[in-house]
Amino acid sequence: MTSPGQAKSPPARWLEYVGALTIQFWTVIRQLRHVFPFVGKPRRWRTTVQQMYAIGASALPMAGTMSFFTGMILALQSAAELRRFGAMELVVNLVAVAFTRELGPLITAIAVSGRSASAISAEIGTMVVTEEVDALRVMGLDPVEFTFAPKYLAALITIPCLTVLSTLSGIFAGYLFLAFSIDMSFRVYVQRAAEAVQLRDVGLTLVKSLAFASIIVQVGCLEGLRAHGGPQGVGHSTTVAVVKATFLIILVDLIATGIFYAMGWSAVE
Amino acid sequence: MTANAGERVICIRNVSVSYGSRHVLKDIDLDIYRGEILVLLGGSGSGKTTLLKQVLGLLKPDTGTIRINGVDITTCPESELAAIRRHVGVAFQEAALFNSLSVEENVALPLHELTHLADSTISLMVWMKLKAVGLADAAKLFPPQLSGGMRKRAAVARAIALDPAILVLDEPAAGLDPIAAAQIDELVLFLKRAFHMTVLIVSHELVSALHIADRLAMLYQGRLIVVGTREQFLANAHPQVRKFLDRTPDPISRGIAEDFINSYLRAG
C-alpha cells in the first residue's frame, strides 16, 4: 500500500487528515438516513441502539464522576479566593456557568473520547486487518452504512444527553460543597444557579457537544480504517485515535468559544 | 477437461498494477470458464492476492480490463458492481467471519441484507448451507469457538449463501492440518459437482491444487508464467515451475543461509 502522508511536512499532513475526515463525514451523513428508526433499515436501528448503550449509557458513571470531582475542585478552589471578599455564594454562579458553558461538554467529550474513540478504532481496525471490511464490500454491503453510520447516530443522540447529565452532576457537586460549608439550602442553590445560567448557554453547549460527538466517531472510524499490519497496527491506531480526538476536541472548543465571544454570545445580559 | 471451449465467466486482459516504482502485476491475461476449478499458484509476494483483489473489484488496475459475465468491473458504476458481486461468493484467507455474530447469523447475514426472504426460509437455507459444509452442529457457536478448519468451512458456507455462480477462495488450506485441508478440497469438489460453480482458488498448496484443479495458473514476479491443465503444468519446463514442483529454494535465499551458517561457524 502506498502511504501518501509519508514525505509531507506536518502542516500538509494535518491538512490531508482534515480533508480525509471531511470526506468521510459527508459519506457518513449521506448514509445516515438508512439508520433512522421507521424510515431506515430495522437492523441498522437495532445496531444503533446497541451502540447507544456502548457509547452513551455505559459512559455515564465515568463522565458523571469526572464532572462531579471537577465541580468539587472548582468549588473548593474558587471558595478559597471568594471567602476573602465575603462572597462565598458567588461559588454558585461560577460553578453553574463554568459547567454549563464549558466544563460539562468538555469533560464529557474527553471521557467519551478515551472510552469510545479507542473502542471504535480498535473495532474497525480489527475488521480491516482481518479482511472483514473487504468481506462486507464483496458481499455488496457498504461498510459506512453497516458500521460507521449506526455509531455516528448513536453518538449524536447520546453525547448531548450525557453532557446534560454530567453538567448537572458537576453543578450538584457545587451544591454539596456549599451545603456543608455555608449551609445553603438546595432550593436557594437551584434558584441562584438558574438565574446565572441563560438558555442560550444551554443551546450553545448542545451544539458544541454535537461537534464533539462528530469528532470522536469520525476520528475513531478514520484511524480504524487506516490500521494496517496486524494487531500491532490496531494498537497503534487506537492510541492515535484517542490522542487526535482529544486534541481536536480542545481545538474545536477553543475555536467555538472564540466565535461565541466575538459574536457577543458569552456576555451576561 | 471440463469446459476449455466453454463460456468465459471471468476474462482478465492486459492487467498491470504497480505501487510506486514496484510492478506487482504485469500484463496479466487469464480466462476462467464456466464450471471449472482454476487454481492460481504462486509464492509469497508473487502478486496472487493483488490479482484476487482486482478480480473482486476491491482495487482497480492501472491498465487493462477485467470482465465478469461480460461486464467490465474496472469501469462500471458502483451499483452495477454490487449487482455482479451478488453472483460472486468469497471466502477470505482469515475467514473474515464477524466475531459478534454466531455461525448461523454469519451465513444468514447476506440473505437478510440482500434478499427479501422470510425469516423461516432464511433459517432453512442457512441450515442447508451449513449441512453442505458439515457444520450443522456448530450453528450456534461463535467464530472464536471454532477450530481453524471449521472457520474456513463456515466462511465457505457464507460465501455460498446466495448460491453464487462464481466462488472465490483465498488460501483455503493455509494453516490447516492435512486432514482439515483435505476436507476443504473435498468440499470444493462437492460444490462444483452439486452446484456447478465456477471456482477460482488462490493457493500455494501444490498437493491440494493438483488434486482439485481443472486448470492451474502460476504467477511469478507479477507475470503469469504458465496456464494449463494438470498434465501441461506438470510437464512445463519453466525453471520457476520446476522449482515450485521440486521445492528448490531460490539461489539467493540459499546464499543467505550459507552466509549465515559460515559467519556463525566463524564466530563460534
Image: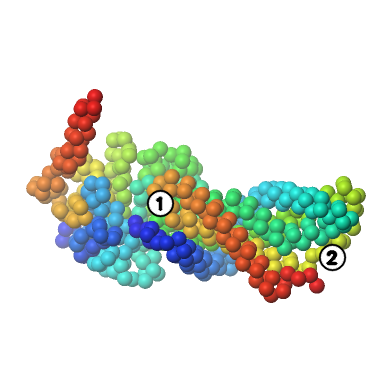
- Residue B72: image x %, image y %? 29, 69
User: Which label sits in the foreground, 1 or 2?
Assistant: 2
Question: What colouring style does the render use?
Answer: rainbow
**Residue drawn at x 71%, y 48% as measured from the top left:** A65
Left or right: where A265 falls relative to A251: right
- The kind of residue on which mark 1 rests is His
- Hey, which quadrant is residue B11 in on the image? bottom left
- Hey, which quadrant is residue B183 in on the image? top left
- Residue A78: image x %, image y %? 79, 53
Contact (Cβ within 8 Å) of mark 1 with mark 2: no
Q: Chain of mark 2?
A: A
Position of B136 relative to B85 (above/below): above
In the image, A92 versus A147, the foreground residue is A92
Label drawn at residue A228: 1
Q: Earlier in the sequence, mark 1 or mark 2?
A: 2
Which residue is under mark 2?
Answer: A195
